[in-house]
Amino acid sequence: MNHALKDPIDQAALLERVSAFAREVVAPGAIVWERERRVGREAIDQAAAFGLCGIEAPREHGGLGLPFSMKVKVTERLAAADFGFAMSLINTQNVSFKLLRDAVPEVAARYVPGLIAGKLIGCTALTEPHAGSDFGAIKTLATKVDGGWRISGRKAWIVNAPIADVVILFAQTEAGAGPRGIAGFVVDARQAGFIHETGFDLAGQHTIGAGGFTLDGYLAADNEMLQPPGLAFKSAMTSINGARTYIAAMACGMVGEALRIAAEYGERRTTFGEPLAAHQGWGWRLAEASAELAACRLMVAHAASRIDDGLDAQIEAAQAKLLSTRMADRQIAALAQAMGAEGLREVHPFGRHQVGARVSNFVDGSTEVMLDRIAAGVRRSAAAAG
């Protein structure tokens, strides 16, 4: 495949290349990666060759310099082939962008070229065994010492954890201080004090690279603090609105691909003397999926446009994630049923997508957290109207 992009970047051409890459590389690769219970590392190298590890990074730093909304469109197309791979790749992209935004130039220069080239894998570490959606409850402790910070603790449920080279890590600087004590650091997973752990055994979607790691007296230099206490928590919460938006897009991508496969199958499969697609009840099932998918894509686009414009998108992102992930849970199962036993074949993504839809309901804030955020917004609106 020739993935070379013209200059200036043709966004439509990029999306066509992403779709071809997802179809020709990720979809068949995901079958193998799931059997082997691993991240599709070799495909990340290929994706990096046409810029997908630096979508938002400025062009002067080797990135594509594209807006957040383009990242959302890319993730939808990748997740159409495999949710886990899309999550793994986009987490490396996120680290390259955040280091350029938040790290001092000498620290960014140490890692960003390798991340954008796909030679280094990135991850962001918030959650811990006892602290998931309750981010303020993290206990990984960073203690000030001469020349830096000594960090100890354990992280869990981190995308890319088993293979990460560069970590954006959040740690508490004052035990019991909650959100106001949390700071952000860049951590080199190849250095002393960082202990990799085996990835988690899951029901599926091992391509996400979910796992944990331990820090045992890891020393971060003073200039490796990305956000000081008081600012890191706010930065993480702002970033998570973006994550919720592209998770919603990924849910749409999985449903879109399931719908495409089911529609094609319905045209060629004959039952009772006519194409399956000619049966009214069967067609209605696909029509419902199509209608819900269209609505969820509009919600994703609205949230993404607000983020592009620098506007608050907390409620819009939560609404998009809530409805899109619920829709994926329901419609992938319905479309798999429409396929009959054929949908069980490994060549089709229905099984992987059903697990991916379940994962999408947990990552970057559970469905229940989304409901809390939306309810708080409703109360604020009611108070303002009163």
Image: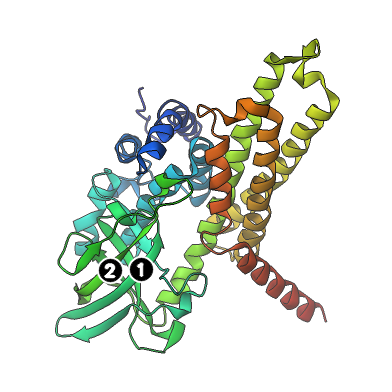
Q: Quadrant of the C terminus?
A: bottom right
In the rendered structure, which amino acid carries the disc numbered 1? Lys
**How far apart are labels 1 and 2 at the CA level?**
6 Å
> Callout 1 environment at 10 Å: few (<14), some (14 to 19), or many (20+)?
many
Q: Residue 273 appears at what percent x and percent y?
A: 80, 10
Q: Residue furthest right?
A: 280
Residue at 31% across / 41% down in the picture?
41
Count every numbered label the image shows and give the total.
2
- Picture layout, residue 119 above or below residue 259: below
Q: Quadrant of the N terminus?
A: top left
> Mark 1 touching mark 2, by CB under 8 A?
yes
Residue at 31% across / 59% down in the picture?
100
87 to the left or right of 253: left
Say which quarter of the image contains residue 272. Answer: top right
In the rendered structure, which amino acid carries the disc numbered 2? Thr
From the viewer's side, name the closer residue of 213 and 239: 213
Looking at the image, is mark 1 or mark 2 earlier in the sequence? Answer: 1
> Callout 2 environment at 10 Å: few (<14), some (14 to 19), or many (20+)?
some
Question: Secondary structure beneath disc 2?
Answer: strand
- Picture layout, residue 170 above or below residue 206: below
From the viewer's side, name the closer residue of 301 and 318: 318
In the rendered structure, find residue 155 and report the number of the disc placed on it.
1
205 to the left or right of 164: right
280 to the left or right of 360: right
From the viewer's side, name the closer residue of 17 and 260: 260
Q: Residue 54 appears at what percent x and percent y?
A: 35, 47
Q: Residue 240 appears at what percent x and percent y?
A: 50, 63
Specify whether residue 346 is in view: yes
In the rendered structure, find residue 214 and report the number of the disc placed on it.
2
